[in-house]
Structures are given as structure tokens and as C-alpha cells.
Amino acid sequence: MSSANKKLLDVSDEKCPSGASTPVLSWSPLPQRKTLRFLQRETKKDSSDGSEKLYPNCDVNIWLRSCEEEIIHPLEGVVSGEIPKWLNGSLIRNGPGSLKVGEEEFIHLFDSSALLHRFGINNGKVTYQCRFLQSKVFQKNWSARRIVLTEFGTKSVNDPCHTIFQRIASIFKKETSDNAMISVYPFGDELYAFTEVPIIHKINSETLATEGRVNVSEYVSIVNHTSHPHVMNDGTVYNLGMSIYATGPHHIVVCFPKSMDPDISMFEKARIVAAVPARWSLNPSYMHSFGITENYYVIVEQPLSISITGVVSAKLTNEPIAGCLKWYHEEYTRITIISRQTGKLVKVFQAEAFFYLHVINQYEKEDHIILDICIYKDPSVLDAMYVETMKSMQKNPDYAKMFRGRPARFVLPLNPDKMTSSPKTNLVKLKNTRAKAHYLPNGDIYIQPEKLCNLGCETPRINYENYLGKPYRYFYAISSDVDADNPGTVIKVDTYTKSTKTWCEPNCYPSEPIFIPNPESKFEDDGIVVLSMIWGGEDTNHVGLLVLNAIDFTELGRAEFETRSPVPKCLHGWFLPQK
């Protein structure tokens, strides 16, 4: 690991990176850029002779399975232990469901056809079902038995029946894939499947049937949005997107107020409540999530950017969008604070370059904003999800490094002391944190994080209902350490003590942990953590629901199911309590 990358994970190093500079609002050529897959080729070395697995405890094939038969009529699970009787509702999950279309195969995990899972929980009993999201691209692919539309990393195959003139004509009426296989979120009483294209699908939370398709860009001017909107306690939903203004691309926050009129949808009431210019006008940052506090929106502009000219070119040449992502490794990460009251920029901070997918939580404290986020030194984790890379991971000595990330805490002083003759003075005035901030010679503020634990954490969740955007103590995650003794470990992190509790069992791979408070909870972790789980190796047709005591991380109960076809690992989900 280079010294520059080491600094991200070693907060004792106080040196400022040489690449730190003034924020750039207009685009200028950035020579130190790298596209995806270049990172992979750059780090790949000759492996061992292949006789031994480099990561014997990790079965990456759990991601590469393809569901061959939907389960429309619920299966009843075999329960062991005790599922709390008060836990009644539906755990809905979303994720990759099939890498195959006819004789063809997608080449990136993000292209896999979306598969929805449902665990119905009622009075200590649990049922399971799964169905493919009936997106337009899914229907076209499976009707044609080939890959019809180009996805994130996979190029579509031309229709062999088309003439050269028909193929040229098709360039000018390109469709965008609506394969929403990342997450699910509620809008009022309705549930929608999400990806970063602003086309979402309404899901029946009882049957998993796809009941509708909403193009959000028809209600508010956006070209994309994150897969992780924020759902407030009053039902209002906020999401971060990108819109093209006359002056260039802007990052915008869209508010979807909860509608009290059944004849008016939340989408019809959508409005832009904040907008700031993208850092680089021709290369806006890629963002998968964002933060919200009582008074502010928090936008993290990482140096992984989307080339607008590249996107235009890719549309014309039918190339995957993955090739339009550029990594400016010598630039800094920019964190922008926007007022929720005015929608205007309040303050900008900069940090060493890092890649991220998921913000954990964020809150205000004593004139500071605390921002917790799962960070990586670069975006090679996206390269690690190419199918060929996953299939060969047991022979790649650098594969674990591609997933090496850690949860980090940044502390952003909102009203720091004025710059003095000693610019290295720490501007963070909070106690019990090793995070730092200081002025750069040009007057900008540079922030350095502290690690929250020394375990790789992904798909982090908190006591969302009660602690979103507020001071909190605990979060829950799954391991991202491929070379761990058990890569299927579930983790509870105490952000006060920087200590962890874990749960695991051999050959078992739980998904994103979702915290559910006890009906009369009295403190933050007074509740349970619910997870779906699958098993590795030959145990492909086996899925389960796991319930952990959130306080001590002991198992309370589980339900297991034998299915008629393989069950792949899922990504994100939502728990809907029974009404």
C-alpha cells in the first residue's frame, strides 16, 4: 500500500496529501485519471499454481448463482429457537437474481436480473418466496433469449435479424435499462425497487408482483439518483440526484412530501429543495448515498466521476457505462454541506481521496457535523465484481485488497477558529474523537478521519427509525474482508468505545442486517437484528431468516427453507411491519 493510501486508514499520520487543492467548480483536464478495470490490471500479479485456494474460507459463488425457478406460493420454514411473537411483517430483499439470459451471460454483478425475496413473519412462523422484477429489460431479454440492452458492465448483442440500416437506426432511439436490482424503499403505503437510473418499480409487498413503473424524471428534472433515499418519520422521502442546468450539471436534493390525497401521488408533489454545481462540470462525481441531519444535507463528492462526454459516446457506440467512470486518484474528496432551510451551500471541506458506497449516519453536535462512512482507498471494489474476476479470485493474491475498506468518522467544524499563523491547529473541538481538521495554506479546511473499528464493514444499518441524522452509538454491518477467518461475519460496532460484537457460523453468508426496535424499547440497541442468509458450497438451494438479539448479538431464532433452485445473495432490503 502506498504512503498516500496508508494515510487514509492510519489517522496517526497528520501529513496533508500533496494533491490537496482549491475546490474546482469548472472542469479542467485531469491527467491522473484511471478507468475501471485499469485498476484491476494494474494490481493483478502472477498467482500461485492454482493448486490451493488463496481464500479458502470465502465462497464467492454465492453471488454468481442464478435463480432458475420463482417461488410464487410461499414456502413455510422450519423454525428453531424462537422468533419473537411481536415481530410481524414482511422483510423484502432485492439483489442479483440471474446472470444468464439464454446462452449468454452478464459480465458484471450489477447487471444481473433483479430478484425480489420476501420473508413473511407472523406469530413466530416464517414463509419465503421470490420473484423476478418484471422490468421492461427483463421482459425483453427473456423474450428474445439474449441480452437486448447494454447494462452497467455488459454490452448488448445485436439482433441477428436486423440489417445494417436497422442497427444504425437503433442508435438514435436507445433505451436505458430499468433493471432495478439494488434496493427497495417505501413511498407512503407503496414499495418501490430502486437502482440509480430514475426508473423505479412498484412492488406488491405480499406477492412480490411488479405492479407499476414510475419514471421519476417525468416529475422532476433529474438524469439519475442514488439507490438510497432517506425516509423520514413523517413519510417524506428525500433523494440526491443530478440535473443538467444551463450552466452545467448540478447535484440536487429532491423532496417527495407524503401525500394526504389518495388521488395525488408523492411523485406529483416532488420538488427540488437544494442544488449545487457539480465539482467538475464535465465529470460529476458518482454517488450511491448521501447524508441528512436536522439542518443540513451532506454530499460527498468522491474523485470517482462520470464522464459526460464518455456517456454520450457510449450511447452512440453501445458501450457499457462502466467505461465512463474515471478515478482521479491524485485529487481530493470534497464534502459539501447544504442548508435544509435555504437550499444553499454552507461550507465545503476536503479530505484525502477515497471511494465509498454507503454513508452510515451523520449528525450535528456542538457546532460540528459528524459523518460516518464506509471508505476504500480506491474503487477497485467495483472491478472486483466483474464475473471473470470473481471466478478467478481464488488465484488472485490482490483480490482481498480490492475489498479492503474500513468504517471511518469525519468531524466537520461548522464555525472553526479563524486561520492563524499556525495553520496545523486542530479545528475539531469535540472530545473523545481522534478525527482532525486544519486549515490548508489557501484557507480551505482539510479533514482527517478516525477508524471506527478495524474490520471491513459493508451495507451498514442503524436504528434508522429513531436515530437517522441524530447522535447515535451503534451500527450493524456485514464483513467485507474476503480473507477473514469467516467472511460471512455480521458485525455490531460501538462508535463510542470503538469495540465490536460479531456473529457467524461456518459456510453461512448473512445479508444486510436490519435493526427493528422492541415495541417498547427504552434505549438505542433495545431490539433485534433481522437478516436473510444463504449457505456456500454445494448447499445452493437453502435460504433462511436469522434473528439476533441486538444487545449481545446472540441468536434468538431462525427459519430455514429448502428451495427448488439456487438462491443467490441479495443486497438491500426493508422491513414493513404488519398493519
Image (cartoon, rainbow, N blue to C red):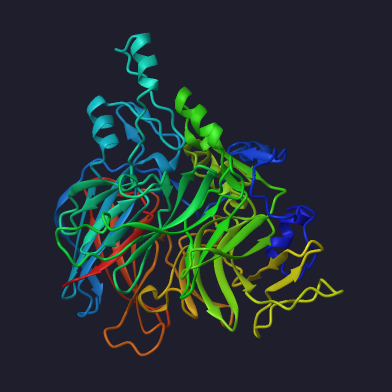
Quadrant in which the C terminus appears: bottom left
In front of the other: 153 or 169: 169
Q: Is residue 316 above or below residue 13?
A: above
164 vs 55, left or right, is: left
Residue at the outermost left position: 73
Q: Nearer the viewer, residue 34 or 498?
A: 34
Give whichever of 541, 292 is nearer the camera: 292
Residue 27 to residue 315: above or below: below
Outermost residue on the right side: it is: 421
Q: In this view, does 309 lie to the left or right of 221?
A: right
Q: Viewer-proximal residue, 125 or 318?
A: 318
Residue 89 coordinates in the image, percent (x, y): 20, 69
Where in the figure is residue 334, as x and y percent of width and height?
63, 58
Residue 405 visible somewhere in the drawing: no
- Position in image of residue 246 (x %, y %): 50, 42
Give how far across and how far down residue 320 sits, in percent: 47, 32
Residue at position x 18%, y 71% in the image: 578
The residue located at (16%, 59%) in the rendering is: 206
- Snapshot quadrant of residue 70: top left
Residue 164: quadrant of the picture: top left
